[in-house]
Image (cartoon, rainbow, N blue to C red):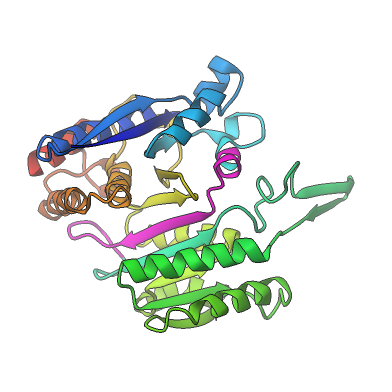
Amino acid sequence: MKKYSIALIPGDGVGLEIIGATRQVLLALQDKYPYAQMDFTEYAAGKVAYEKFGDSLPKETLEGIAQSDATLMGAMATGLVPPPSPMGKLRKEMDLYADVRPIRSYPGVWCHRSDLDIIVIRESTQGFLADRNLYKGSGEFMPDENTVLSLRVLTRAACERIAQFAFDYARRLKRRKITIAHKANVLRLGDNFFLEICRKVATNFPEITVNDEYIDTVANKLITKPEDYDVILTTNMYGDIISDEAAALVSSLVPTANFGKSCAIFRPIHEALLEIAGKNMVNPLPTILCAVMMLEYLGETEMAQKLQTAIAKVLEKGKVRTRDLGGQASTEDMTQALISAL
């Protein structure tokens, strides 16, 4: 029997509900696969942790993540705690350098196109995001009250690492094309630096077609010609923006995975949604889709496929829809529908 240690971090707002729902579904799933068992341990982070411990990312939580095989996270009200952002701190402490977001359309729910299947991969330790691009302090400065300087940091090591990750990931999933998104016509040093490094790594993957496009072109074509994209590889802030844009094309039924060298954290893209917390209204599917990614990461592909199929089946039937999908079903309704489908 395989045993997996899973850290659960509900966070704030609806986090407790979506993590609870995902845990229920995973327990129902593992009943069918007795050779693979998951042990769950819950840890605090976000506003809840700050109010209880005076720290939005306590040492105990960091240690728990480090000792676990994988981590499922809910949502954090990061704007309601003092800096540094707990997610930014977590990325820095765990060196979570690869952010992976699969964009997939499902039958029975609104999608821009019925055949969307795109993966956005971004480097997530450097770039323009000021909460994580310096060893100490922030990448933004105010030399006087009328001036702000925002720094972008790109290093060869980080660019090579994310490029290698993206091409390895594409090869493993039998993806055939990677588009490198950049703005090298304006940011001639930084973006050309990133582009050239990615192209050099690409030479080791002859079976994968590689092209590059300006980031504004990518933003346009995600709407007008999304079939052009298979895997998109880009730097931190560009990827942050276009992956949210792409998520809107599939009713935001999108998971996210953050990978480090020896750590993986899976979380939905939505916020803590404090206004509906505790009302049994939130859609748990984005978090349950994170569980699919987590199972794939753990090597339990059959379990992942079983859960993925159950999600697609429930959505296609259309009998159970939460409010964000145009229905009136509750969090518990969706959870039980998935368990029944399993």
Residue 69 visible in this rendered orientation of the protein? yes
Find residue 48 and report its horizontal and vertical position in percent: 50, 22
- In magenta, the rendered stretch is 89-111
Extreme residue toward the top, this view: 52
Residue closer to the observer: 309 or 34? 34
Note whether residue 58 is visible: no
The residue at 18%/48% (across/down) is 303
Quarter of the image that includes the N terminus: top left
Q: Position of residue 319 (x, y in %)?
A: 11, 46
Residue that extends furthest to the front in the rendered view of this protein: 1
On the rendered image, what quadrant is the C terminus found in?
Answer: top left
Question: Residue 84, position in %: x, y?
Answer: 66, 36
- Counting from the top left corner in percent of width and height, residue 321 is at 20, 44
1 drawn magenta: no
- Residue 154 is left or right of residue 271, and the answer is right
| Residue 155 placement, left or right of 14 | right
Residue at 32 percent of width and 42 percent of height? 287
Task: Count the numbered circles shown.
Answer: 0
121 lies left or right of 301:
right
Quick check: is 110 in the magenta stretch? Answer: yes
Q: Residue at x 20, y 36 (%)?
A: 25
Q: Quadrant of residue 149?
A: bottom right
Vertical arrangement, residue 35 with respect to residue 60, above or below: below
The residue closer to the viewer here, 39 or 315, is: 39
In the picture as drawn, the residue positioned furthest to the right comes out as 144
In the image, is residue 181 above or below residue 292? below
